[in-house]
Image: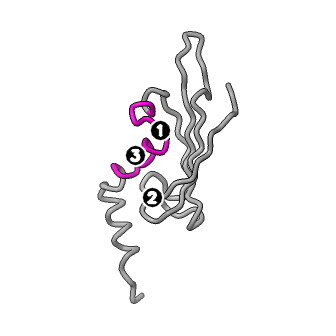
């Protein structure tokens, strides 16, 4: 198990996010690997995202799942774009765009 992370900043729908990526979090004897990916909304701080209500998500995945998208940033963007089409996120997003009188 290694604790070496690559950290990059990106944007999704106007929210600055930090992506922390460790492709060798767990390496098994057969050389297969489990990666660790963390996504944190930085600005606005801990803003909800389609993949997390709290602005923080820890995710373990086979490295091959991310390699399909080439970079962790592309993987996270595709993941959030897909999750943003859920009825729950659509309702949340619409409610936050409208002004409330109450």
Q: Is residue 13 magenta?
A: no
Residue drawn at (60%, 34%) of the image = 22
Mark drawn on residue 12:
2
Give the residue at the far right of this rendering.
3
Left of 101 or right of it: where is 28?
right
Give whichever of discs 3 and 1 has the lower sequence position.
Answer: 1
Check disc 3 and report its element: helix, strand or loop.
helix
Q: Looking at the picture, does residue 29 appear above or below residue 90?
A: above
Which residue, given by chain and number where applicable, does mark 1 sit on?
71
Q: What residue did someone put label 3 on? A: 79
Highlighted magenta segment, given as a residue range: 66-82
Secondary element under disc 2, as helix, strand or loop, is strand
Other residues around mark 1 within 10 Å, as few (<14) / some (14–19) / many (≥20): few
| Disc 3: CA contacts within 10 A as few (<14), some (14-19) or many (>=20) | few
Q: Which residue appears at 54% of the width and 56% of the height?
A: 17
SS under mark 1: loop
Q: Nearer the viewer, mark 1 or mark 2?
A: 1
* Among the 4 quarters of the image, the one containing residue 2: top right
Identified at 61% across, 24% down, the residue is 26
How far separated are the C-alphas under marks 3 and 1? 12 Å
Along the viewing direction, whichever of 101 and 69 lies nearer the viewer:
69
User: Who comes first in sequence, dot 1 or dot 2?
Assistant: 2
CA separation in Å, label 1 and label 2: 15 Å
């Amino acid at each position: 198990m290694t604790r070496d992370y690559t950290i990059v900043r990106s944007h999704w729908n106007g929210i600055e996010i930090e992506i922390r990526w460790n492709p060798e979090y767990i390496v098994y004897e057969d050389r297969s690997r489990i990666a660790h990916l963390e996504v944190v909304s930085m600005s606005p701080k801990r803003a909800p995202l389609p993949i997390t209500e709290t602005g923080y998500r820890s995710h373990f995945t086979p490295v091959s799942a991310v390699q399909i998208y080439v970079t962790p940033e592309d993987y996270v963007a595709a993941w959030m774009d897909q999750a943003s089409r859920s009825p729950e996120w659509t309702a949340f997003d619409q409610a936050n765009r409208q002004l409330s009188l109450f």
